[in-house]
Amino acid sequence: MQVAGWLASGRRRPYGDVVRNRPTILGSLRLAAAFDVIAPERVLFVPTAANGLADRNAVVDTYREQFDGVDVIEYDVDDPGRSSDIDALASVDTVVMSGGNPYHLLRSLRTSGFDRALRAAMARGVGYVGVSAGALVAGPTLEPIAGISPFDRPGDLDLAALAVVDVVVLPHDDRQGRRVLHEQSLMAHAGAHPMLAITDDEVVAVRDNGWELRSTDRRQIRPAVDTDAAAIAECFLAAGRTAWTFLDPARFAELEPPEASWRSRIAERVVPAELLVAEDASGLRGVVWAHRAPDGDMPGTPGEVDAFYTHPRTWGSGGGRRLLDLALDQLRCAGCDNAFLYTEERNERARRVYEAAGWRTDGTVRDRRYLDAPIREVRYVRPL
């Protein structure tokens, strides 16, 4: 299977000519994580996506009430009494585009010319926060939501979006019924664009050199960079020393952190999102390495979770599960339809985590030596 576009090239820079003095933020619902990143002082709030909804006022109020302590100018693109090159864009530091119907919003932005005014403002350094529909129109296309959005796709609407970022977000991933639909979309559009399914508590901060996923509890997940190698190596050793009690603890104590091998893995990725790290205020909390890989008798197009480690200080917090789930989404984006991983058969805690997440053993084992001791690894598999 040929994988095209961003996946084959590893391209990380955004579409278009927008130069970001601050990150572009894409969210689902809550703005707290976005405002933690950019701390706006004067905002142009665009509620246009909610126009035509039966609960329009309630939807708009959901966003209005989150602007506590922020100076807000409200501007409805559909208002015929307002100019598309509104003076207010020159007096704000951030534009916030609210949720609603993304198809209606995209059409309105084009018809009014506000899309051009917005791009010009962003080129001058004005920040952008898009939530739900506002996040979707910031990407390269609305194609990935066709068939999964609660709104009907207009037959005459060109779905090419603003392309101020190259990431397509799928919002509200934690709402009932969305996860299955998002998995289908991730696989159906594999290789076309970077894609991230996010919950209502999460935002994606897109910078010129990549993206990071942030949550309201200030945890972050992002593609690893070269300078992460030492912290990843330390996390690996901390997890191993705590969990692999079946190995000689003295040998573990003698090990130097394998920083060089992790630096090589970071450098050899096909795309940055193959190797993700999770962070919090105390530093790196986990790492996962997942990529397309055949494995003997595995059917279809398999992907392997080649490494998954979380720091013992975080165990039981649930952060590792989110990191693993995001890695599986990246395998779906890479065109994989099933996944596998190996873990030592005596590594009971890890096995419980995998089984709780839907992984099952298939009877395949492999034997090897580590730290001069024999180990036996069992294979876990799951469909994607």
Image (tube, grey):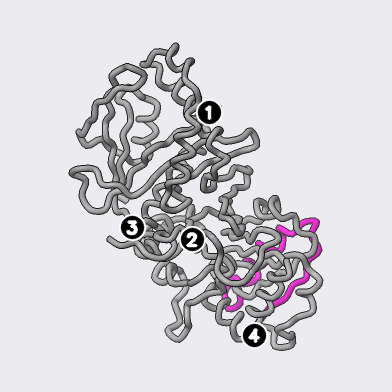
**Quadrant housing residue 137:** bottom right
Q: Identify which amino acid the numbered label 2 is placed on.
A: Arg
Task: Report the residue marked by disc 2.
Answer: 11
* Label annotation for residue 234: 1
Q: Earlier in the sequence, mark 1 or mark 4?
A: 4
Q: x, y (%) of residue 341? A: 32, 38
The x and y percentages for residue 185 are 39, 63
Q: Is residue 72 magenta?
A: yes
Mark-to-mark CA distance, 3 and 4:
38 Å
Q: Are marks 2 and 1 in contact (CB under 8 Å)?
A: no
Name the residue carrying label 3.
335
Residue annotated with mark 4: 112
Q: Are marks 1 and 3 in contact (CB under 8 Å)?
A: no
Q: Which residues are magenta?
A: 51-77
The amino acid marked with disc number 1 is Glu
Circle 1 packing at 10 Å, graded few (<14), some (14-19), many (20+), is some
Marked residue nearer the N-terminal end (2 or 3): 2
